[in-house]
Amino acid sequence: MAHPAFKTGVKSALSASLGTAAWGLMTGVATMNSSLSLTESLLMCVLVFAGSSQLATLPLLVAGAPIWVVLATALCVNLRFVVFSVHLRPYLMHLPLHERLFKGYLCADMSYMIFVNQFDHRDATPEHRAEQMAFFSGNCVCVWVSWIVPSLLGMALSQVIPLSWGVGFAGTLALLGIMCSLANDRLRWLSVGVAGSAAVAAYALPLKLNILLAIAAATVVCLTLQTALSKTDASKADAAP
């Protein structure tokens, strides 16, 4: 926290904190209005720290869906963090395991997007590593506080704030902003189109299974196309004089 880049990281996340706070507030309200107890709601808020998977699994828990459906939904919704982890690995591998795990817990969509836009390549010098980690820590702490505090407030005011307010739509807008920032090539836009089309086409499926279908469809289509393009590029490289 003593490094100047920590404050810079905090400031960089402030612009997104309002949307995050509104999303967290309504997630807290929705959690308390579900079938979970107060203790379970608090644990989900603090330990899970993943709004999209929380909102995706809450209706399943209320409907009494099988636990494997709940877990599979949460896993698929959070698969993007596997990609985030692979990308962040060069930046974090010099840290001890416990620090990597803690930073992994703190890292959210906003944190990842802001960090990679600020540091688009890893610098191996100790000075730059310290700057990057201080920025990342400040960024993550700001996003975490912007989520956790409103979530707890939403739980406390769950009987006062109606879900019909629809403030959670700010969270949707925040995710759309992330998506537009990360979808910077044709293949990624294709995955957006495939996933969106599949989710809408399968909307009638029970237990939010259209989400699983959308993720699976986008993954299969894009991996298949990427493999074909890689083979084509390799063939062209071999045929070149």
Image (cartoon, rainbow, N blue to C red):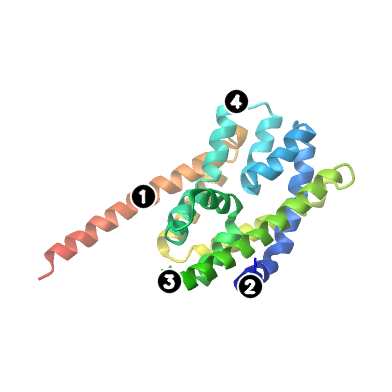
x, y percent for residue 10:
66, 67
The CA distance from mark 4 to mark 1 is 30 Å
x, y percent for residue 231:
23, 55
Q: Nearer the viewer, residue 231 or 155?
A: 155
The amino acid on which the numbered mark 3 sits, given as a three-letter code, is: Thr
The amino acid on which the numbered mark 2 sits, given as a three-letter code, is: Thr
Which residue position is annotated with label 3?
125
Which residue position is annotated with label 2?
8
Residues tagged 3 and 2 counted as in contact (Cβ below 8 A): no
Q: Does 24 sit left or right of 232 as displayed?
A: right
- Determine whether 178 is above or below 60 in the image: below
**Residue depth check, mark 4 versus mark 3: number of the one nearer the observer:** 3
The amino acid on which the numbered mark 1 sits, given as a three-letter code, is: Leu
At horizontal 68% and vertical 55% (from top left) the residue drawn is 144
The CA distance from mark 1 to mark 3 is 35 Å
Residue 66 has which mark? 4
Residues tagged 4 and 1 counted as in contact (Cβ below 8 A): no
Instruction: Please tell me which of labels 1 and 2 falls first in the chain.
Output: 2
